[in-house]
Image (tube, grey):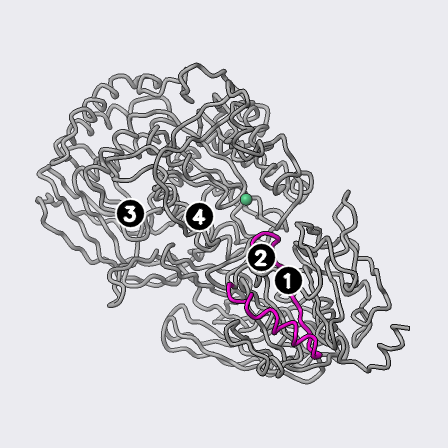
Amino acid sequence: MRKNLISIFIIFISCTFLHAQKPKTPSSSEIYQSIQKLNFLGSVLYVAAHPDDENTRLISYMSNHVKARTGYLSLTRGDGGQNLIGPELRELLGVIRTQELLAARRIDGGEQFFTRANDFGYSKDPEETLSMWDKNEVLSDVVLAIRQFKPDIIINRFDHRTPGTTHGHHTSSALLSLEAFDLANDKSAFSDLLKAASVWQPKRLFYNTSWWRYGSREAFDKIDKSNMISVDVGTYYPLKGLSNNEVAALASSQHLCQGFGRLSQRGSQEEYIELLKGDPLTDDDNIFAGIDTSWNRVKGGKAIGDILYEVEKSFNFNNPSQHIPQLLEAFKMLQNIENTHWKTQKSKELKAIIEMCAGLYLEVSADTNWATPNEKINVDIEVLNRSNLSINLVSLNNSGDLNISKNIALKNNVKYNFKEVIKIDKDESPTTPYWLSEKGTLGMYKVNDSKLIGLPETPRFYNIDFNLLINNVPLTITKPIVHRYSKPEKGELYKPFEVIPEASAKITEKVIILDNDKQRDIAVVVKAGRDNLEGSVEVCHPNDWSVYPKNQKVNIKHKGEEQTLVFTVIPPKNESEGYMSPIVTINDNLYTKELIEIDYDHIPFQTVLLPSESKIVRLDIKKKGENIGYIQGAGDVVPESLQQIGYNVLTIKPEDINAEMLSRFDAIVFGIRAYNVLDDIQFKQQQLFDFVKNGGNMIVQYNTSRGIKVNHLAPYNLKLSRDRVTNENAEVRFLNPEHPILNYPNKITQKDFEGWTQERGLYFPDDWANEFTPILSMNDKNESPKDGSLLVAKYGKGHYIYTGLSFFREFPEGVSGAYRLFANMLSIGKEDLKLEAKLND
Ligand SMILES: [Zn+2]
């Protein structure tokens, strides 16, 4: 029973925190829609693999039209993708995408869940995916999600029958959902989860199909659809003034880091779901056919329904508070039903409706958005009853030592303000995404506290309980502490309240590449979480490197301020790599983490604590040529990386390109997907080819095969394909071992292809003119060799190089072989001409 209480507590808190941005103050029509949902006792769980996979049209339709409780289980948080709005990658990108999903759900009315699976990057088939993930753990998380959410209906986004036609994560999500559909109701399966949730059998499992699965609309029109249900997801909601597909577009437009900002759509639109398992369909196209979704489905529910259906039927839009006595009556009856699942879920909904109907405004705002353990913070508590109801504020308390008796009768529309001081517990752990607290594996997050598994974010423990008596019925409403402030140019703003450590530190550069044995200065930035921080800092480093001074004093007057300390790093004579970490000592406490802030307008402010470390690489690298012009595409850190190894890199805009300015460079390098995103580059292509003809080098990194903005990517025929090698350890075979690009100025060996991350490369050309020399061959398991990853062609006096190798992923990870190979690409043709003549013999 106790365990049960804990899990209820967590679910409740996590849901209230969804509103930690500016609190929503609902209109009558929103209250009415909540009552409609309260009176529908059925649920739908949508299952896919990534943020953005979810069909928001269907989620919104289920939530807003059908009125079902609707959840989206995304197996991963989307860490493996790219970020179009900022520098965050990997786990930090996963934090942004988690918040973007929550933002989308706030719009379409769904709820959000995850598993512990990590989005480790592209995977071609489910077999590979499930060998990277711990299949049993992810399956366990899907079973847990089903047992906790108890959906009547599950809808898979992807088809489990077509492995290899889409991302392996996608097919895996469908396979795991299918398996979990049966296991969720099997007491002997995952019995360790039974203390968290009882077994559950969903009634039907669907696949959210589409015409594109069948090749064309015509082909789809002809198929037998007796096993399918179609719904019109363009339905119009007068209460919202929006069509369902408009709501869906607003929701999916929250995926801004993926560039999903989009136009809204209106009008009738069919969506199809195909029955895979469970009870057969009936004729009326009702996915809930045969499932009682009324209050009668719950033992003791009929009498509650009698009250609540009447409220819905006679709802007073001008004065919703009129219904509170009935709502309270239903609330009291609800507390006596046996079924804990329905009791918990509907109590939560009903309590929120009572709060809304009373026009209650309850807020706890701290004078800061973060504090450290042991710190005292001032909070401003606002209580406002905007109804004629008899509401008493009995007391305020939190889980700590705050317990204040008030006994105030709240008069209609009279604001009550209280100032209180809250002390942060001395042992309080800092607020950070729970799935990043411990180091996991490439495929899985590590979550030690099993109660957190599945939750979208870390529950907040600094909350205030408002203990109220409404018409003499005791009701406790819990609010998280927030920080309310304003900015002249933005208006009123909110931030969640967080606990941070008293000190954090980082080395400003994440990868430090030294191409010789000269010493280099590095900057360590220490941030104070409290006033008057005094201590010392040292830098941990591998044995063959040295850093001096050994340690330095740190002294920071004000909370939030930073101090920069410069240390000198001396690399070893020979190639070597490792990690450096700053350690801050305050009294006897050691701090080894970096505090990262994520601040975008469309999601709540986030702080993340990660181990503070920077990779250091002493590279044995030679290079020719000095000046590089870089044309940014979709965004990468290649320019900064090339600067690290001593090149002069200037970023140039397509419109500024002319023959004279090109002549200043030894090489022009194109950023990833430049030919997909730069409209004007088509007008400059000939000048770029002329630059090569005159002796320059042009290096083009990967573009996607669809949507190229030029007719001729290269001076010779070159056709892109979707060939990719996703296994970062795939064998690399040298097709032309004597070619200068593998020999000069750096001798490239197998060792240079060790330690690559995420993948070898993508969108390799599969057809090219004879002028191109393919250099490398590689392939994923059970696939034919792919020879287009690095193609070199002489054109006039210079060289044109096309490469789908993932330098943009390897450089930020300090992969030395990638740097050495790229240096050769930049140096080609700049070598002793005699050597080249000899090789051409
Ligand atoms: Zn996906």
Judged from the image, the secondary structure of the residue bearing numbered disc 1 is loop
First along the sequence among labels 4 and 1: 4
Left or right of 448? Residue 517 is right
Residue 683 inside the magenta-drawn segment: yes
Residue on which disc 2 sits = 708
First along the sequence among labels 2 and 3: 3
Left or right of 220? Residue 482 is left
Q: Which mark is residue 479?
A: 3
From the viewer's perspective, is the residue at label 2 or at label 3 nearer?
2
Quadrant in the picture for the C terminus: bottom right
Tell me which corner region of the image, top left, top right, bottom left or bottom right, holds residue 290.
Answer: top left
Q: Position of residue 567 (x, y in %)?
A: 58, 81
Quadrant in the picture for the N terminus: top left
Residue on which disc 4 sits = 457
Q: Which residues are magenta?
A: 679-708
Q: Position of residue 468 (x, y in %)?
A: 19, 40
First along the sequence among labels 2 and 1: 2
Q: How many marks?
A: 4
Residue on which disc 1 sits = 713
Mark 1 residue type: Leu
Q: CA distance from mark 4 to mark 2?
A: 39 Å
In this rendered view, identify the residue nearer to me: 799 or 253.
799
Mark 3 residue type: Lys
Left or right of 831? Residue 278 is left
